[in-house]
């Protein structure tokens, strides 16, 4: 535009450009000047500000995203808590380790059958949440479960039981095993709760004690998840805990 004006001035040296023309040219160029100027003040007082507005928009988007993540996590936790409170299938004798072991095995088998027999959807998710809630009640009473083997199991119900144990009873000594298991998990429901368990584990270990390599692995995992999915939001909550920015 400046070159065009210079050429026009050479060709038509008597050409007059009034204030209105200048204002119109500035208005036309204004949307593209945000990367160059913080603001432009026009004759008469009007002022165009770019970067402050951009900062306010980014802050508003960040607050909205954070609120969405918090509501999502609270809703899932509330559903599981409600299912746990309303369940009636748990053995009444909580001191009987054999009864608790049998209950765990029943729930593990039920989850595996559910995965094989029921198509994905809201109905299956509701059943999965009920089973996970049952496991949350049972697993704290299982004496010394082999969590390493359970997390590495090919059986999805067994892996879910391990996550239920670590969600109910966080254990800092299993942190590395937990990270590896969550990152290699392929089933959406289990991976979602795996990230939730990982968030509790970060609280137990301390965010400042989590190795940088682990944080990088988790960040690298985020783009691999479906944008806006429960898993992505759950992982983002974990990364927020680990953020040092």
Image (tube, rainbow, N blue to C red):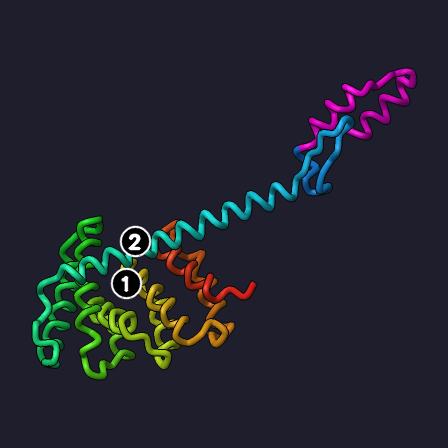
Residue at left 42%, top 60%?
A: 237
Magenta stretch, main secondary structure class: helix
Tell which of 167 and 5 is nearer to you.
167
Q: Quadrant of residue 137?
A: bottom left
Left or right for 88, reference 130: left
Label 2, residues with CA under 10 Å away: few <14, some 14-19, many ≥20:
few
Q: Disc 1 marks which residue?
A: 190
Q: Position of residue 198 (x, y in %)?
A: 37, 68
Q: Is residue 100 one of those drawn in magenta? A: no
Residue 115, can we see it? no
In the picture, the quarter occupied by the N terminus is top right
User: Element at badge 1?
Assistant: helix
Q: Using a 10 Å C-alpha cutoff, classify the residue at mark 1 as few (fewer than 14 neighbours), some (14 to 19) or many (20 or more).
A: many
Residue with the most extreme bottom position = 144
Are dots 2 and 1 in contact, CB under 8 Å? no
Is there any visible trace of residue 10 in the rendered image?
A: yes
Q: What residue is shown at x 36% (from left), y 69% (from top)?
A: 200
Q: Which residue is under mark 2?
A: 75
Span colored in magenta = 1-30
Q: Looking at the image, is mark 2 or mark 1 earlier in the sequence? A: 2
**61 sits left or right of 97 in the view:** right
Residue drawn at x 55%, y 46% as measured from the top left: 58
Q: Which of the 4 quarters of the picture holds residue 24?
A: top right
Q: Is residue 115 above or below residue 201?
A: above
Locate residue 8 relative to residue 138 in the image: left or right.
right
Percent of width and height locating residue 36? 72, 42
Considering the numbered disc 2 on the image, is that residue within a helix, a strand or a loop?
helix
Q: Is residue 95 above or below residue 120?
A: below
């Amino acid at each position: 535009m400046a070159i065009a004006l210079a050429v026009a001035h050479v060709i038509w040296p008597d050409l007059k450009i009034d204030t209105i023309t200048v204002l119109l040219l500035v208005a036309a160029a204004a949307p593209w000047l945000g990367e160059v100027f913080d603001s432009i003040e026009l004759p008469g007082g009007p002022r165009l500000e770019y970067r402050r507005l951009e900062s306010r928009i980014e802050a508003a988007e960040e607050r909205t995203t954070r609120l969405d993540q918090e509501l999502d996590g609270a809703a899932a936790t509330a559903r599981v808590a409600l299912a746990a409170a309303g369940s009636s299938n748990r053995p009444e004798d909580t001191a009987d380790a054999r009864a608790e072991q049998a209950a765990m095995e029943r729930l593990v088998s039920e989850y595996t059958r559910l995965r094989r027999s029921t198509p994905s959807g809201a109905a299956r998710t509701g059943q999965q949440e009920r089973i996970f809630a049952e496991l949350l009640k049972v697993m704290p009473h299982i004496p010394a479960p082999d969590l390493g083997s359970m997390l590495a199991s090919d059986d999805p119900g067994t892996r879910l039981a391990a996550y239920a144990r670590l969600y109910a009873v966080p254990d800092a000594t299993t942190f590395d095993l937990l990270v590896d298991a969550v990152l290699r998990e392929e089933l959406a429901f289990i991976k979602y709760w795996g990230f939730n368990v990982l968030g509790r584990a970060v609280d137990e270990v301390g965010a400042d004690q989590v190795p940088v390599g682990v944080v990088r692995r988790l960040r690298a995992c985020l783009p691999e998840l479906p944008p806006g999915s429960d898993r992505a939001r759950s992982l983002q909550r974990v990364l927020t805990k680990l953020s040092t920015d």
